[in-house]
Image (cartoon, grey):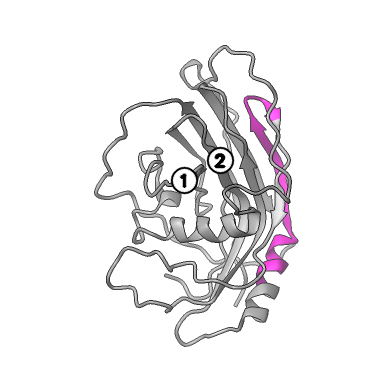
């Protein structure tokens, strides 16, 4: 794991479409992202953002939802009325297929930054907040669509720092080793979708003049099947993507 990491994670989409991946021929009502002050089970965007990161880091490197190339891990760790969708590590276009139970709201990053401390380079919450905000200020969204209709993401950040690895399910990780952490960026909280097939496409990047070691041009698609079906078993291992720094150290 690289020290002091700021991810740009995105759910993004390829322009190519095939008949099998297109939404079913249903006249869906236009869906809008829930507003910044929306709450689900008492949690708003800030609380859901913290919970999303804890979910994203539950599994060890190489098996995380953001490293899943197909969507086979989409059901892992899902609880309650909000269904999390993963971003990527910014390493290239990905299309995932995911079956979502009917009635679940969807929460996902469009493009967000995470800053956290590492052994040997501890930073306080104020420093982490400033670093994450600096990245979030330079994010550019090219396209966010559901079934061809545009969506407007919400900029949100937690009120305080947190431990992004608090729910990690691997013994070699010492509790609190990467705390504190702070996140800032663009998120989507969507109401429950109508039963059937939906296509979620997002295209986001960082501004070209941001002083970073690597620029993220991400393209990511979810083909969502809303409705009940048997859950797939977890795969033992996923291809490993290398985590990349965003901010120059």
The residue that appears at 54% across and 67% down in the rendered structure is 245
Q: Is residue 222 above or below residue 46?
A: above
Q: Position of residue 65 (x, y in %)?
A: 42, 49
Relative to 78, residue 240 above or below: below
Task: Left or right? Give the position of 194 relative to 228.
Answer: right
Q: Quadrant of residue 170?
A: bottom left
Q: In percent of the image, x 57 and y 46: which residue is there? A: 108
Q: Is residue 111 left or right of residue 22?
A: right
Closer to the camera in the image, 189 or 111: 189
Q: Which element type, helix, strand or loop, lies under badge 1?
A: loop
Provide the residue designation for mark 2.
106
On residue 11, which mark appears?
A: none
Q: Residue furthest bottom?
A: 120
Q: Up-down: is 133 above or below 207?
A: below
From the top left corner, tell me how far across and down residue 72 is, in percent.
35, 39
Where is the C terminus found, in terms of image quarters? bottom right
Quickly name the residue at label 1.
80
Residue 125, horizontal then vertical, whole percent: 62, 79
Residue 134 on the magenta segment: yes
């Amino acid at each position: 794991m690289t020290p002091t990491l700021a991810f740009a994670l995105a759910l993004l989409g390829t322009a190519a479409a095939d008949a099998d991946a297109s939404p079913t021929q249903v006249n869906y009502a236009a869906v809008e992202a829930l507003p910044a002050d929306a709450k689900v089970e008492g949690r708003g965007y800030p609380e859901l953002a913290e919970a999303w990161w804890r979910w994203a880091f539950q599994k060890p490197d190489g098996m995380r939802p953001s490293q899943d190339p197909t969507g086979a891990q989409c059901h892992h760790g899902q609880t309650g009325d909000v269904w999390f969708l993963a971003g990527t590590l910014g390493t290239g276009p990905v299309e995932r297929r995911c079956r979502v139970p009917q009635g679940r709201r969807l929460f996902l990053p469009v493009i967000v930054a995470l800053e956290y401390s590492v052994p040997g380079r501890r930073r306080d919450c104020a420093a982490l907040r400033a670093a994450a905000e600096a990245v979030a200020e330079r994010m550019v969204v090219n396209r966010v669509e559901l079934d061809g209709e545009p969506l407007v993401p919400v900029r949100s950040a937690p009120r305080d720092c947190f431990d992004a690895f608090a729910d990690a399910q691997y013994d070699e990780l010492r509790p609190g080793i990467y705390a504190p952490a702070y996140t800032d960026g663009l998120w989507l909280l969507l109401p429950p979708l109508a039963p059937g097939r939906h296509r979620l496409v997002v295209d986001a990047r960082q501004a070209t003049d941001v002083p970073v070691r690597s620029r993220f041009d991400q393209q990511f698609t979810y083909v969502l099947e809303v409705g009940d079906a048997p859950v797939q078993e977890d795969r033992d291992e996923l291809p490993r993507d290398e985590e990349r720094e965003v901010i120059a150290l």
